[in-house]
Image (spheres, rainbow, N blue to C red):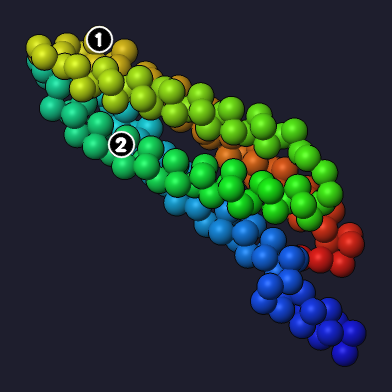
């Protein structure tokens, strides 16, 4: 009975713990979606410039640009939600400003700078692009991948630690 009361109490819509639990679930789902897109981008970027028989990589770079732009839009939506809803909710719930979130926002911004650099480089293509130049352009996406892969891992560790902390207080 006590277990049922606890479950009922914390699943009441509008209860701060329920909202936090929903936000953590959304965060995890968005990370899975973004990591799938990021892995796809990584695979395509890694393949750029490898086939020595290709004389002009411009078309492949432009195709990859479309994928990178779509990923960037999704990442930006995720970042906005984290900054406007998730991080303030966690700070409120735990009664403290968590400096890790400032670092996480900076990692997002750094990754976006690398994606922007790729998009701008490809946008500026006016002549055939050889393999070496194509690999150099694609390296911007490889850098973004490294930053975001590490970022998602750290963010998951922080959220897991907070979830564990919340569980100690009877939540989640």
Query: Is residue 101 at least partly visible in the picture?
Result: yes
Label 2: how many Cα within 10 Å (few below 14, some 14–19, many 20+): some
Question: Could you say where residue 149 lies in the image, as x and y percent from the top left?
Answer: 53, 34
**The quadrant where residue 151 appears:** top right
**The quadrant where residue 13 appears:** bottom right
Left or right, residue 154 beside residue 26: right
Query: Is residue 51 at least partly visible in the picture?
Result: no
Callout 2: SS: helix
Left or right, residue 167 beside residue 153: right
In the rendered image, the quadrant that contains the C terminus is bottom right
Q: At 23% across and 21% down in the image, what residue appears?
A: 122
Instruction: Identify the residue under disc 1.
Output: 132
Q: Are marks 2 and 1 in contact (CB under 8 Å)?
A: no
- Foreground pick, 57 / 96: 96
- Foreground pick, 64 / 70: 70
Question: Could you say where residue 125 lies in the image, as x and y percent from the top left?
Answer: 16, 16
Label 1: how many Cα within 10 Å (few below 14, some 14–19, many 20+): some
Left or right, residue 9 beside residue 48: right
Q: At 26% across and 17% down in the image, what residue appears?
A: 121
Question: Could you say where residue 18 lies in the image, as x and y percent from the top left?
Answer: 70, 69
Number of disc labels: 2
Instruction: Identify the residue under disc 2.
Output: 69
Callout 1: SS: helix
Is tag 2's residue or tag 1's residue first in the polypeptide sequence?
A: 2
Left or right, residue 159 beside residue 171: left
Question: Could you say where residue 99 lies in the image, as x and y percent from the top left?
Answer: 75, 33
């Amino acid at each position: 009975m006590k277990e049922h009361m606890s479950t009922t109490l914390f699943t009441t819509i509008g209860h701060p713990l329920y909202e936090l639990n929903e936000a953590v679930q959304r965060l995890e789902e968005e990370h899975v979606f973004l990591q799938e897109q990021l892995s796809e981008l990584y695979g395509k970027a890694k393949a750029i410039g490898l086939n020595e028989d290709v004389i002009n990589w411009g078309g492949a770079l432009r195709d990859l640009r479309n994928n990178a732009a779509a990923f960037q839009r999704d990442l930006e939506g995720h970042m906005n939600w984290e900054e406007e809803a998730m991080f303030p909710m966690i700070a409120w719930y735990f009664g403290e400003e968590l400096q890790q979130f400032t670092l996480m926002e900076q990692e997002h911004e750094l990754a976006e700078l690398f994606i922007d650099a790729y998009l701008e480089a490809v946008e500026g293509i006016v002549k055939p692009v050889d393999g070496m130049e194509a690999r150099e352009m694609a390296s911007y996406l490889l850098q973004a991948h490294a930053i975001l892969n590490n970022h998602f891992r750290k963010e998951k560790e922080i959220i897991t630690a907070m979830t564990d902390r919340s569980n100690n207080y009877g939540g989640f």
